[in-house]
Structure formats: C-alpha cells, structure tokens
Amino acid sequence: MGKKVRRHLIIVILFLMSATIGLADAPPDPGGDPGTSGGTPVGGGSPIGGGFLITMVLAAVYGTRKTFILRKK
C-alpha cells in the first residue's frame, strides 16, 4: 500500500471516529434519590435471568459435546 493511500485511509478513519464520538448521547439519569433507600435500582430493574439461563444451557450443551467427543477417541 502506498504512502498516499495509507495517509488518506488514516484521515478517513479519524474523521469517522470523530463523527461517531460527536453523536454519542449523555448517560441516562440513574433514577431515584441516592440518599434514600427503596428507590428504583440503577438500571431500572431490568431482568437478566433469561440471558443467564440461555448461557448456562449453551455451556452445558458445549460441555456435553466435548465430553462425548473425548470419550469417542
């Protein structure tokens, strides 16, 4: 790759990165009063159980497959 092409590529990448950073939103308000208890938790009480269950099932399937392959050898 020539020096001229490399220089143009770097300029384009820096331009795109600066445009992306400029479009970023501010972080959301955590909600609730930090001085009191019993308010809305940070994150708004989002459920995370479904993703955890899927990850554990996939890990169990992967482990079972690896065990089956190792016993087959």
Image (tube, rainbow, N blue to C red):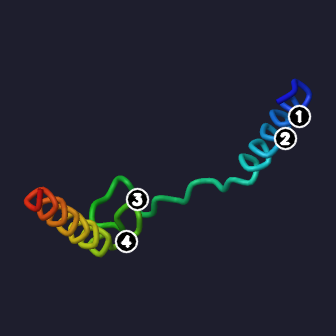
Instruction: Please name the amino acid that badge 1 sits on.
Output: His
Mark 2 against mark 3, which lies toward the viewer?
2
**Marks 1 and 2 in Cβ contact (< 8 Å):** yes
Q: Secondary structure at mark 1?
A: helix
First-in-chain label (3 vs 1):
1
Q: CA distance from mark 2 to mark 4?
A: 38 Å
What residue is at 27 percent from the left and 61 percent from the top? 37
Q: CA distance from mark 3 to mark 1?
A: 50 Å
Q: Quadrant of the N terminus?
A: top right
In the displayed image of the protein, which residue is found farthest to the front?
73
Mark 1 against mark 4, which lies toward the viewer?
1
Q: Quadrant of residue 10?
A: top right
Q: Residue 38: horizontal and vertical position, in percent? A: 27, 66
* Residue 12 marker: 2
Q: Residue 5: horizontal and vertical position, in percent? A: 88, 33
What residue is at 40 percent from the left and 59 percent from the top? 33
**Can you say whether 47 is above or below 21 in the image?**
below
Question: Is residue 8 rendered to the left or right of residue 27?
Answer: right
Q: CA distance from mark 4 to mark 3?
A: 18 Å
Between 36 and 52, the one lying in front of the other is 52
Between 13 and 33, the one lying in front of the other is 13
First-in-chain label (2 vs 3):
2
In the displayed image of the protein, which residue is found farthest to the top?
3
Q: CA distance from mark 2 to mark 3?
A: 44 Å
- Disc 4 marks which residue? 46
- Disc 1 marks which residue? 8
Mark 4 against mark 3, which lies toward the viewer?
4
**How many numbered callouts?**
4
- Disc 3 marks which residue? 33
